[in-house]
Image (cartoon, helix red, strand yellow):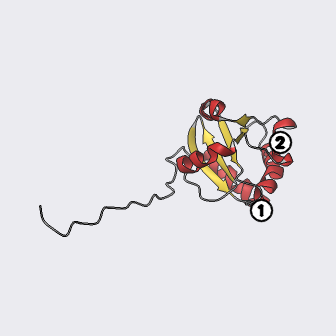
Amino acid sequence: MNTLHPLIVRLHVEHGYPLLDSGGLEAFSAAAGDTILFCTGDPAQHPECLDVAVVLPELLRAFPGRFRAGIVARDLEPDMQTRYGFTRWPTLVFLRDGAYVGALSGIQDWSVYLGRIQELLVAPARRPPSIGITVHTAAAATTCH
């Protein structure tokens, strides 16, 4: 993992959230139950990730025993962004039994977090949204074959 900000390290050391590298991410994500994957982004570019790092333990306390949380390695975040279709950092990805349920990006008001998480707890798993990939076609030839 890249050098982590102390607030992100705190999630691992004090709260026990695993640091998910390529060897652990798939197994952690696929486990039974409700899971939150924390995709932080670069704190220098996206300082909101530090706010989310402070709020995340409080969210888990608000829903005792419902979620397992893990911190996605920064080098895996581009793949996570493609897989789960989010476009903003930081993002919390919600999974149930390994299947995508939803995502929350950026810092939110507490009431927004609580309401949206309540919705996600009863929402069915679904296909993740697409981030939209631009498709280019070769220019049409000007002569017939």
Q: Which mark is residue 50?
A: none
Which quadrant is home to the C terminus?
bottom left
User: Which percent across, then down, holds residue 67?
Assistant: 72, 39
**Most foreground residue, 136 or 70:** 136
Near mark 2 (Cα within 10 A), the count class, few <14, some 14-19 or many ≥20, is some
Under mark 2, the amino acid is: Val
Number of the front mark, 2 or 1: 2
Q: Quadrant of residue 47?
A: bottom right
Element type at mark 2? helix
**Most foreground residue, 43 or 113:** 43
**Residue depicted at 19% across the width and 70% down the height:** 142
Tell me if residue 82 can be seen.
yes
**Residue depicted at 49% across the width and 54% down the height:** 130
Q: Earlier in the sequence, mark 2 or mark 1?
A: 2
Residue at the limit of the structure toward the bottom, as seen here: 142
Asked if 61 appears above or below 131 in the picture, the reply is above
**Residue depicted at 71% across the width and 59% down the height:** 106
**Most foreground residue, 141 or 79:** 141
**Most foreground residue, 103 or 46:** 46
Under mark 1, the amino acid is: Asp
User: Which percent across, then down, holds residue 21?
Assistant: 67, 35
**Residue depicted at 81% across the width and 34% down the height:** 16
Which quadrant is home to the N terminus?
top right
The residue wearing badge 1 is: 109
Could you tell me how far apart the alpha carbons at marks 2 and 1 are, in whole angstroms? 24 Å
The residue wearing badge 2 is: 9
Near mark 1 (Cα within 10 A), the count class, few <14, some 14-19 or many ≥20, is few
